[in-house]
Image (spheres, rainbow, N blue to C red):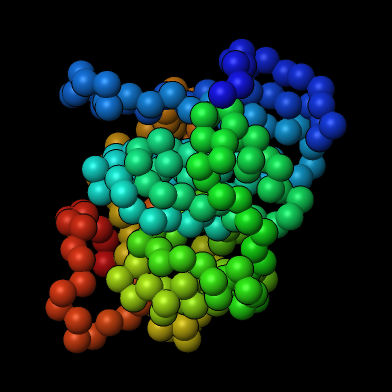
C-alpha cells in the first residue's frame, strides 16, 4: 500500500495527481467494520475518468450501506475510472473486477495499489455495446456497478446492451447505477423496454445518501443524483432475491 498525504499533489508520467480521502462510517456502530477510509488518486488532466464525480460517491455510499449484502458477492464495475465504488466493494469483502477504456486502466490500478488491493482486483479493458472475448468469458456475476456511465445520450444504448448481455448470462444479477440529472427530456424507458430490463429508484435517505457532503467529502454538493437498480424483466420467477430496499420508488 502506498503512503499518501491527504490533499497533496505530485507530478508523474500521467500528469499531476491529487489525493482525495473518503471516510465511510456507521455512527450507530463502534466495531472495526463500522468505518472505512479510502484514498483515491485523481489525475488532473482533461480525461473525465480520472476524477471522482458526484455520482461515484453516492454509489459508494450505497455499497457501504449494503456492505453485509456485498460481502462475498461477485461484482464488476463498468467505466470504473478512479474506481471509488469498486474499491469500497472490495474492501467490504466482495470479489471485484474493474473495467474501463484502455486509457483509464492505469488510474484503476493506481487506486487499487493505494488501497492495498494490488493484485487482488483484476482490471480489464471493456468497450460498451461490443460483445468482446473479455465479455464472453466474464466469470459469473452477482452485481454490476456503474456510476455516471449514463452520461451521454449517445452512449445509453451501448451501456444497456452490455448490461443486458451480462444480466442474461446472470439472470439473478443486478445493475446498481447512479446518474446525475442533467435534462428532464432524457429517458431510458424505451431502451429498457427494448432490452428487457426494468428499473427501480432508491430514495437517497434509505441509504444515508441524501447529504451534500458524503463520506467526509464535498460531494455530491448541490447536484441531483439518482440511485437505480436495474434487473431483467422476469414475469414468473418468484424465487428472485428480494434485497428488501422497501423505500424503492416504483
Is residue 16 rendered to the left or right of residue 24?
right
The answer to which image quadrant residue 74 occupies is: bottom left
Image check: 241 left or right of 179?
A: left
Image height of 62 relative to 17, above or below: below
Viewer-closest of 187 and 19:
19
Q: Residue at x 25, y 58 (%)?
A: 248
In the rendered structure, the answer to whether residue 70 lies left or right of residue 145 reads: left
Q: Is residue 59 left or right of residue 183?
A: left
Residue 77: horizontal and vertical position, in percent?
A: 51, 54
Location of the N terminus by quadrant is: top right
Residue 110 percent across, percent down from the top left = 65, 35
Residue 91 visible within the image: yes
Q: Position of residue 35 (x, y in %)?
A: 33, 24
Q: Residue at x 20, y 18 (%)?
A: 30
**How many callouts does the rendering have?**
0
- The quarter of the picture where the C terminus appears is bottom left
Residue 129 percent location from the top left of the image? 62, 75
Seen as rendered, the residue at the extreme left is: 238
Residue found 20% across the figure and 66% down from its top: 241
Q: Residue at coordinates 46% horizontally, 50% vertically from top-left?
A: 96
Q: Nearer the viewer, residue 44 or 201?
A: 44
Q: Which residue is nearer to you in this view: 75 or 53?
A: 75
Q: Is residue 223 visible?
A: no
Amino acid at each position: 500500500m502506498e503512503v499518501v498525504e491527504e490533499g497533496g499533489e505530485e507530478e508523474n508520467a500521467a500528469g499531476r495527481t491529487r489525493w482525495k480521502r473518503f471516510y465511510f462510517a456507521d455512527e450507530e456502530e463502534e466495531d472495526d467494520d463500522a468505518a472505512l477510509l479510502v484514498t483515491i488518486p485523481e489525475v488532473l488532466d482533461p480525461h473525465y475518468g480520472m476524477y471522482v464525480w458526484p455520482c461515484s460517491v453516492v454509489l459508494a455510499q450505497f455499497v457501504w450501506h449494503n456492505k453485509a449484502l456485498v460481502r462475498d458477492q461477485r461484482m464488476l464495475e463498468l467505466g470504473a475510472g478512479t474506481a471509488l465504488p469498486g474499491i469500497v466493494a472490495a474492501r467490504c469483502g466482495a470479489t471485484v473486477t474493474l473495467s474501463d477504456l484502455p486509457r483509464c486502466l492505469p488510474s484503476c490500478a493506481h487506486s487499487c495499489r493505494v488501497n492495498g488491493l494490488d493484485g487482488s482486483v483484476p482490471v480489464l479493458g471493456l468497450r460498451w455495446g461490443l460483445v468482446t472475448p473479455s465479455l464472453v468469458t466474464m466469470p459469473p456475476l452477482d452485481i454490476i456497478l456503474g456510476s455516471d456511465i449514463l452520461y451521454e445520450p449517445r452512449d445509453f444504448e451501448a451501456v444497456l446492451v452490455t448490461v443486458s448481455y451480462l444480466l442474461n448470462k446472470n439472470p439473478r444479477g443486478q445493475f446498481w447505477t447512479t446518474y446525475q440529472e442533467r435534462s428532464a427530456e432524457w429517458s431510458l424507458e424505451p431502451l429498457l423496454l427494448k432490452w428487457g430490463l426494468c428499473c427501480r429508484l432508491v430514495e437517497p435517505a434509505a441509504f444515508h445518501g441524501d447529504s451534500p457532503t458524503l463520506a467526509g467529502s464535498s460531494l455530491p454538493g448541490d447536484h441531483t443524483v439518482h440511485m437505480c437498480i436495474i434487473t431483467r424483466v422476469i414475469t414468473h420467477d418468484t424465487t428472485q432475491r428480494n434485497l428488501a430496499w422497501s423505500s424503492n420508488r416504483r
